[in-house]
Image (cartoon, rainbow, N blue to C red):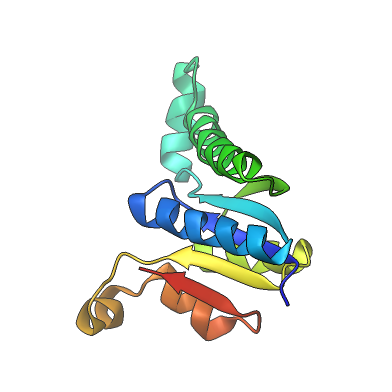
């Protein structure tokens, strides 16, 4: 059925729950997992401030470190139950585009995501990344709440 599952994570409880569900599904199906984290790029003004101040640990380094920690946690969860897992991250102002792009690039046949459970009005006013993935993607999406 599904052989390569992308698990989108932002490190939240909802994303961790989705990872647990996705990993269990992968274990049951004998699938592999690709964990993916999207980082927001730093605004140009803040970036220049980092450069001017010669910050020892720039925003980008801190963001990558956080992403790697989230991805490592998912890989550890997968390895614990015998599921092959690898992962990656990308900087993008539109996380839903990065998620769909990573799923296509990695040849994933399912995307697993958590949702924070916004109401219809919240989704209408601000949008949600999960909703945006659902509306622009031709790959099946499993939404965990």
Residue 7 visible here:
yes
Q: Nearer the viewer, residue 100 or 31?
A: 31
- Expressed as whole percent of the image width and height from the top left, the position of residue 44 reads 48, 43
The residue positioned 55% from the left and 35% from the top of the image is 64
- Expressed as whole percent of the image width and height from the top left, the position of residue 12 reads 37, 49
Quadrant of the rendering where the C terminus is positioned:
bottom left
Residue 102 lies left or right of residue 142; in this view the side is right
- Residue 117, quarter of the rendered image: bottom left
How many numbered circles are shown? 0
Vertically, is 114 above or below 33?
A: below
Residue 43 lies left or right of residue 74; in this view the side is left
Quadrant of the rendering where the N terminus is positioned:
bottom right
Residue 98 visible here:
no
The residue positioned 36% from the left and 57% from the top of the image is 14
- Residue 74, quarter of the rendered image: top right
Vertically, is 69 above or below 7?
A: above
- Expressed as whole percent of the image width and height from the top left, the position of residue 107 reads 78, 67
- Residue 101, quarter of the rendered image: bottom right
Q: Nearer the viewer, residue 26 or 6?
A: 26
- Expressed as whole percent of the image width and height from the top left, the position of residue 65 reads 53, 30
The residue positioned 59% from the left and 69% from the top of the image is 111
Vertically, is 123 above or below 98?
A: below
């Amino acid at each position: 059925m599904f052989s390569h599952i992308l698990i989108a994570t932002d490190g939240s409880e909802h994303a961790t729950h989705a990872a647990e569900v996705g990993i269990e599904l992968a274990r049951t199906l004998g699938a592999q997992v690709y964990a993916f984290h999207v980082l927001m790029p730093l605004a140009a003004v803040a970036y220049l401030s980092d450069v001017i101040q010669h910050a020892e640990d720039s925003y980008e380094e801190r963001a990558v470190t956080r992403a790697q920690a989230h991805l490592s946690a998912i890989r550890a969860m997968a390895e614990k139950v015998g599921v092959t897992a690898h992962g990656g991250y990308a900087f993008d102002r539109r996380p839903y585009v990065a998620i769909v792009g990573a799923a296509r690039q990695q040849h994933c046949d399912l995307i697993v995501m958590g949702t924070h459970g916004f109401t219809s009005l919240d989704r209408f006013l601000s949008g949600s990344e999960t909703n945006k993935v659902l509306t622009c993607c031709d790959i099946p999406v499993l939404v965990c709440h």
